[in-house]
Image (cartoon, rainbow, N blue to C red):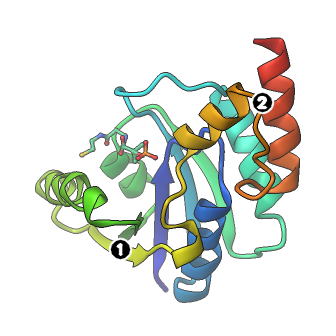
Amino acid sequence: MIRAIYPGSFDPVTLGHLDIIERASKIYDELLVGVLGNNTKSPLFSVDERVTMLKEVTKHLDNVKIISSDGLLVDAAKENDVQVIVRGLRAITDFEYELQMAQTNRMLNKDIDTMFLTTSVEYSFLSSTTVKEIAHFGGDVSKFLPACVVDRLKEKMIIK
Ligand code: PNS
């Protein structure tokens, strides 16, 4: 049995993330989606809000479980008996950062490997950051996000 983790900020989860989750859930016996801290980003949504949205949009996937951690990814992987880290690769611009992260994680724990899935072409330009910017300026984000996330993002923008 192979258990994998798909880690990220998911601030918020986009259709691009969901595409990777659905595809990875077919490859691995169990897929944990991990909301982890990225100290280069200031999240709009709390960890609890991001976990709730991820649970909502993955409820049709029986072998997917949502977790969160404020520690190192390799530690969350070890605690959860995970052998594989899954990351999506959109374009060549992602590669350097992803390679650095994969190599560093392997230095931290040689028993955990990173596997990359190429993002489906229709989502190859998509990022949570861009989507938040579009929403901030009143644009339509419904093509980029699951419907329940569109509503949460609109509410968040009003509160802000
Ligand atoms: O969606 P993101 O922001 O690109 O995801 C990056 C994330 C959260 C996976 C990465 O920052 C991470 O693994 N954070 C946990 C802390 C950690 O292990 N850092 C070392 C990575 S080499």
The percent position of residue 49, horizontal first and vertical second, equals: 74, 33
Mark positioned earlier in the residue sequence (2 or 1): 1
* 60 up-or-down from 27: above or below: above
Mark 1 packing: few (<14 Cα in 10 Å), some, or many (20+)? some
Q: CA separation, marks 2 and 1? A: 33 Å
- Quarter where residue 153 is shown: top right
The percent position of residue 114, horizontal first and vertical second, equals: 29, 69
| Residue 63 relative to residue 67: left or right | right
Q: Residue at x 35, y 74 (%)?
A: 116
User: Looking at the image, can residue 97 be seen?
Assistant: yes
Q: Amino acid at mark 1?
A: Phe
Give the labeled residue for mark 1. 116
- Quarter where residue 82 is shown: bottom left
Marks 2 and 1 close (CB-CB < 8 Å): no
Residue 22 badge: none
Q: Nearer the viewer, residue 10 or 71?
A: 10
Give the labeled residue for mark 2. 138
Query: Which quadrant, please, contains the C terminus?
Result: top right
- Quarter where residue 144 is shown: bottom right
Q: Amino acid at mark 2?
A: Gly
Q: Residue at x 35, y 27 (%)?
A: 40
| Residue 71 relative to residue 12: left or right | left
Mark 2 vs mark 1: give the one in front: 2
The percent position of residue 147, horizontal first and vertical second, equals: 87, 53
Per the image, label 1 sits on a secondary structure element best described as: strand
The percent position of residue 42, horizontal first and vertical second, equals: 49, 22
> Where is ligand 1, by quadrant?
top left
Q: Nearer the viewer, residue 66 or 95?
A: 95
